[in-house]
Amino acid sequence: MRGSVAILLVVPVVVFLVAVYVQREYEATWQAVLAREYPSVSAAQRQQLTLKSLCADPELAGETMCSDLAKVRLLRQGAVVGAVLGIALLLGIRWAGQAGVEDRTVLLRLFRPGLHVTLWTLVGLIGLQAVLAIGALYYGMATATGYVLPKLMAGIGLGALIGMGMLIKASLSVVGPLRHPVVGKPLGKEEHAALWDLVRDVAAKVGTQPPNTILAGLEPNFFVTEAEIVTPSSRYAGRTLYLSLPLCRVLERAELRAIIAHELAHFHGQDTQFSVKFDPIYRGATQALHSLASAAAERTTQLLATLPALMILRYFLDSFETAEAKLSRERELAADRVAATVGGVMPTATALLRVHLYDPAWPVTLGLARKAVSERQAYANLSETYQRVVEATPLPTLLAQVDARTHPHPTDSHPPLSARLEALGQSVNDLIAHTQNPVPADPAINLVTNYEQLEHELSRMVQSMLAQPDNGVSSSPVQ
């Protein structure tokens, strides 16, 4: 917050000091005129007739010097108003962020209106500070040197107008529907009856309804969502459960059961609804910040005009991100407890360790796929390739810093593995003997009918995307 306060006060403080300087220079000039015109009047008597008192006469208020003095006085008052308004905004953001830490309902209620209030207040602050800066530059330069810099003043004004326009646009369009692009294929209820029976059984024990759709993909991740899922061939609404085929190859069936219990617990706790309502707004605000920063960086005057707004918007997002991260951590630990109750403590803990342990294998797999694509070749089955990478990676390499790893998720932030295992009364050292063999005795992948055919289809889709330079795929085909 200190950095935001400092950058926010730069323009008001400078303008205030310039206004004080110009007022003193005006008074000194006036006293010099009196001394020249009335040499017989003592200095003490002349000092009683100040320019300020003279301009208080309505008949003289329209004189050039009095008019300029009034404008400089407005600059000084505007600087105070700008400083107070900015500090009040920061204090309001701080209060809202702290209130959101305690209750996600409060977080959700405050975030959207708080974002709009922040954006529109920033519009006003940018306009006010631009006017103040232009006024201070004009009167300061004219008083000190007798010259003005019209091009610089015009640049500040133009930069401020562009910045204000971008903030207004952001405020009007910051909220959009949340969609998750996924490279995945649906698993039908009849064809994959064993898997669906497991999911229904787990849902009943968790106390929630089963998902409407189960999607299988290659990214090593599991998640549930109620946002719209967009695949290369279709769209899916309602409750969706995403399963990773590569991870199903290296997980025991009991471990997959625990993972499904964890994910369905998010439906029970209405976490997915929270994500649907919170994430689009947060995502839109983040995009607005990046767009504003990128545009401002192209012009120095625009950057100067919008820098305070950038700092405050960043502080706003950081304040609520801290609250959301705390609540997300609590939701994940609560879901782990549900998983331990439904699937058992040991399968839950070993599943967590395996998922985190094998995280580094996916970037390696994608790297191999990229290399093959660049050579106009392709892997028939990236899921099988992933399993081979896992099996070929030495255990010490897999264990390196595994305690501190956080598993990626499309909407929520997860606590580190060490915190999740500790909450279950386990540790990596306790579990390593149970997970050092990446070839499970009862692999979860057997629950998926004709899984190799499905993996081949998904592998072709992923590598086709990797072959397109502008597809947006960077480290993972699933965003």
Image (cartoon, rainbow, N blue to C red):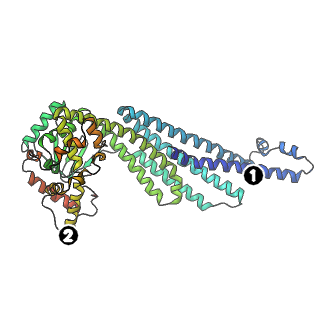
Amino acid type assigned to the residue bearing label 2 in the image: Glu
Q: Looking at this view, is 417 or 150 the one in front?
A: 417
Q: Which residue corresponds to the image point at 23% horizontal and 53% vertical from the top-left?
A: 396
Q: Which residue is mark 2?
A: 375
The residue under the point 51% across, 37% down is 91
Q: Quadrant of residue 268?
A: top left
The 10 Å Cα crowd at callout 1, few under 14, some 14 to 19, many 20 or more, is: some
Nearer mark to the viewer, of 2 and 1: 2
Query: Whole-percent x and y of residue 345?
Result: 19, 35
Name the side, left or right, on which 463 lies relative to 137. left
User: Based on the displayed image, in which of its 4 quarters is residue 371 positioned?
Assistant: bottom left
x and y percentages locating residue 76 in the rendered image: 66, 45
> Which residue is painted at 61% across and 54% down in the image?
134
Q: Is residue 323 left or right of residue 91?
A: left
Left or right: 257, with 81 as reference point: left
* Crowd class of label 2 (few under 14; some 14 to 19; many from 20; radius 10 Å): few
Whether label 2 touches label 1, CB < 8 Å: no
Query: In the image, what residue occupies the spot 45% across and 51% down?
Result: 166
Label 1, secondary structure: give it. helix
Q: Which residue is mark 1?
A: 25
Q: Give the mark, 2 or 1, whose residue is nearer the N terminus.
A: 1
